[in-house]
């Protein structure tokens, strides 16, 4: 299970270092990088990506407009990438542009996948979502007992 929050810089060639603790949880050195939902990038281990993309394609139809939106956002831009010997991945210009990645980035391990955010976009996201988080956590209160 991949977890953790890290801050790393994107270099001038569009590469970013995947933190060693996250790399340690990944089998192999090939991953799939695609657009996420909230102006971030999603990075999946290849096997996990196969499961998700197969489920997405099996549960949708090209004849449904909303399904095509999801397919175009998540499936179409997906790219297999490799972690180099230095622990970096290269992010294609189109994906960097989508997520507004310029320099400082936030990298999250979220169980089954990794998110890569522009630090600025990430801060804006939480500024807008803080109230929603409070509501969501209140709703979970009865389901979880510590």
Image (cartoon, grey):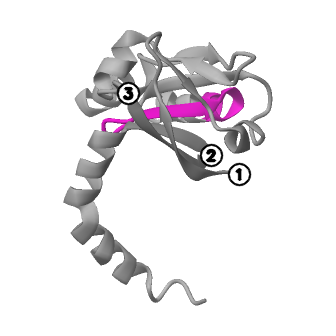
Vertical placement of residue 21 versus 46, above or below: below
Left or right position of 118 against 47: left
Vertical placement of residue 102 versus 81, above or below: below
Q: Nearer the viewer, residue 104 or 50?
A: 104
Q: Do the residues labelled 2 and 1 touch (CB within 8 Å)?
A: yes
Q: Residue at x 60, y 33 (%)?
A: 44
Res 132 → quadrant? bottom left
Under circle 3, the secondary element is: loop
Res 27 → quadrant? top right
Q: Nearer the viewer, mark 1 or mark 3?
A: 3
Q: Which of marks 2 and 3 is in front?
A: 3
Location of residue 127 in the rendering, given as x and y in whole percent from the top left corner? 22, 58
Q: Are marks 1 and 3 in contact (CB under 8 Å)?
A: no
Q: Residues within 10 Å of mark 1 (few under 14, many from 20)?
A: few
Determine the CA span between mark 2 and mark 1: 6 Å
Q: Residue 103 carries which label?
A: 3
Location of residue 103 in the rendering, given as x and y in whole percent from the top left corner? 38, 27
* Residue 86 magenta: no
Q: Can see residue 25?
A: yes
Under circle 1, the secondary element is: loop
Could you tell which of marks 1 and 3 lies nearer the N-terminus? Answer: 1
Under circle 2, the secondary element is: loop
Q: Can see residue 62?
A: no
- What residue is shown with label 1? 1
- What residue is shown with label 2? 112
The magenta stretch is 36-51
Q: Residues within 10 Å of mark 3 (few under 14, many from 20)?
A: some
Left or right position of 28 against 58: right
Which image quarter is the C terminus in? Answer: bottom right
Q: Which of 50 and 144 is in front in this view?
A: 144
Q: Which of 60 and 88 is in front in this view?
A: 88
Location of residue 48 in the rendering, given as x and y in whole percent from the top left corner? 65, 35
């Amino acid at each position: 299970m991949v977890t953790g929050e890290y801050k790393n810089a994107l270099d001038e060639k569009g590469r970013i270092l995947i933190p060693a603790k996250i790399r340690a949880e990944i089998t192999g050195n090939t991953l799939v990088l695609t657009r996420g939902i909230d102006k971030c990038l999603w990075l999946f281990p290849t096997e996990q990506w196969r499961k998700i993309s197969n489920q997405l394609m099996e549960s949708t139809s090209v004849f449904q407009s909303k399904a095509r939106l999801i397919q175009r956002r998540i499936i179409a831009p997906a790219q297999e990438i490799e972690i180099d010997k230095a622990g970096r991945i290269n992010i294609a210009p189109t994906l960097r542009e989508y997520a507004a990645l310029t320099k400082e980035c936030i990298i999250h391990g979220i169980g089954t996948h990794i998110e890569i955010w522009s630090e600025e976009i990430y801060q804006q996201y939480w500024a807008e979502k803080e109230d929603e988080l409070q509501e969501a956590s209140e709703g979970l209160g009865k389901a979880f007992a510590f």
